[in-house]
Image (spheres, rainbow, N blue to C red):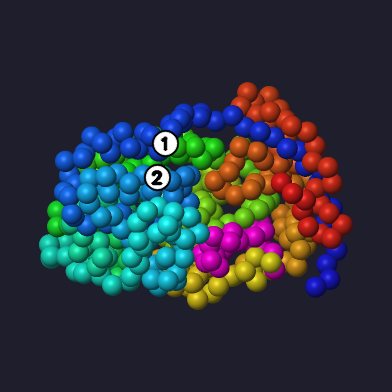
Amino acid sequence: MAIDLVPFPPMFRISRTFPRPAVLEPERELWCRLEEHGQLITSGSQIAIAVGSRGITGLADLVRVIASWVKERGAEPFIVPAMGSHGGATAEGQAGILHDYGIRADSVGAPIRSSMDVVELPEGCEVRVFQDRYAHQADGIILINRIKPHTDFHGPYESGLMKMLAIGLGKQAQALEIHRHGVRGLRDISPKVALHVLRHSKILLGVGLVENAFEDTAELRVIPAHAIPEIEKELLQRARELMPGLPVDDVDILIVDEIGKDISGVGMDTNVIGRLKIPGEPDPERPRVRMIVARSLTPASHGNAIGLGLADIVTRRLFQAINFEATYENLYTSAFLERGKVPVIADSDAQAFAFAARACTGSRDPRVVRIPNTRRLGILQVSSPVLEELRERADVQVLGQVPGPMNEDGTLGPF
């Protein structure tokens, strides 16, 4: 496709200072906190450890600690994927996601039992309630998940243990049951389902994790089942306080180097980019981003590019990495189809920038921000107009100009 390329502007690397509370030895901390609940494990019992599809720092090591602790009490642990319809809504796909996170029988000391089969729990909730068959047949269930603001809605419970109880453990059957009610299903019905699961299931403990802006474990709590609803509210507020964002509210072109399920449930965190793309739901007031360019898809996504519709332009290499079967399975379950629509496809980074710059009519010197992804915002690249706004900020350090940001072959250099 012939197009006159727009010169890529000079870019400058900056670093940002965020609060960085951290648990210094997460594995040791987890073991100590688990020890407070040893009376819950009976010798000879089968204990399911529910693990989701979110990227979590040190996840495999933490799962191994839980499995070791369970075995020390004479019980038999096993791992179940608790990720709704992710992994193409197949047992193999969900086991593959865990494998990519380093969660294998030999690495965590517990077998993986992956299935899409579910058992329906007793009636009494607004919707039908399901649970993974393997987990349901166990003598007890331990959850582990990161707690953070959700990408679709805001409420007292967003992404965390309550959502894992409601949707993750309920597999595709529960995801469909809740998502057919749209945002109301996620925000209002999902907590009711989680409470129903707590009443009618064998949940023992929830391991709740909060990460800081640098992906360190900032909070680690081992929560008895009855206390999960209350403690999760506290941890969600803590996650909001620690969540990073863009350094400025107004951006002409946001370049996102990679999107993917391991970064956010919808590829890019909507709280960071300021877009929801859910009909009837208003976008966040800030940031205000005119054009979003997405450059690549993470390997850990297994081709699931849900959220590509949040971008305006994607590169051809990202497009060619898409597994549409896996993407559409996740997309149709969510029912938010806008997020799966294919944006404009550019043959190179240079062409993607040219498309975006031309779309930003009236901007001769565009405000450009480049980020690795929406989880890693400590080091950014910005154009001159953004740099000038940030020079006096105490939380920003200018690291220098990026040498030749665009290569001769039309690709952006390493971050």
- Relative to residue 194, is residue 321 drawn left or right? right
The one nearer the camera, 17 or 94, is 94
x, y (%) of residue 391? 71, 28
| Secondary structure state at the residue bearing disc 2 | helix
Q: Residue at x 62, y 55 (%)?
A: 258
Q: Measure the C-alpha gap from mark 2 to mark 1.
A: 8 Å
- Most distant residue in the bottom direction: 325
x, y (%) of residue 305? 54, 65
According to the image, label 2 marks what residue? 62
- Relative to residue 241, is residue 203 drawn left or right? left
Q: Local crowd at mark 2 within 10 Å, few (<14), some, or many (≥20)?
A: many
- Relative to residue 385, is residue 114 drawn left or right? left
Whether the magenta-drawn stretch holds residue 57 is answered as no
Q: Local crowd at mark 1 within 10 Å, few (<14), some, or many (≥20)?
A: many
Q: Which disc is residue 356 wearing?
A: none
Q: Which range of residues does the magenta coloring cover?
A: 293-316
The one nearer the camera, 381 or 52, is 52
Three-letter amino acid code at disc 2?
Answer: Leu
Q: Residue at x 75, y 68 (%)?
A: 347
Whether the magenta-drawn stretch holds residue 303 is answered as yes
| Secondary structure state at the residue bearing disc 1 | helix
Q: Residue at x 65, y 60 (%)?
A: 296
Where residue 268 sits, quadrant-wise, is bottom right
Q: Are marks 2 and 1 in contact (CB under 8 Å)?
A: yes
Q: Quadrant of the N terminus?
A: bottom right
Q: Which disc is residue 26 wearing?
A: 1
Q: Is residue 355 placed above or below 233 in the rendered structure?
A: below
Which circle's residue, 2 or 1, is located before the other in the chain? 1
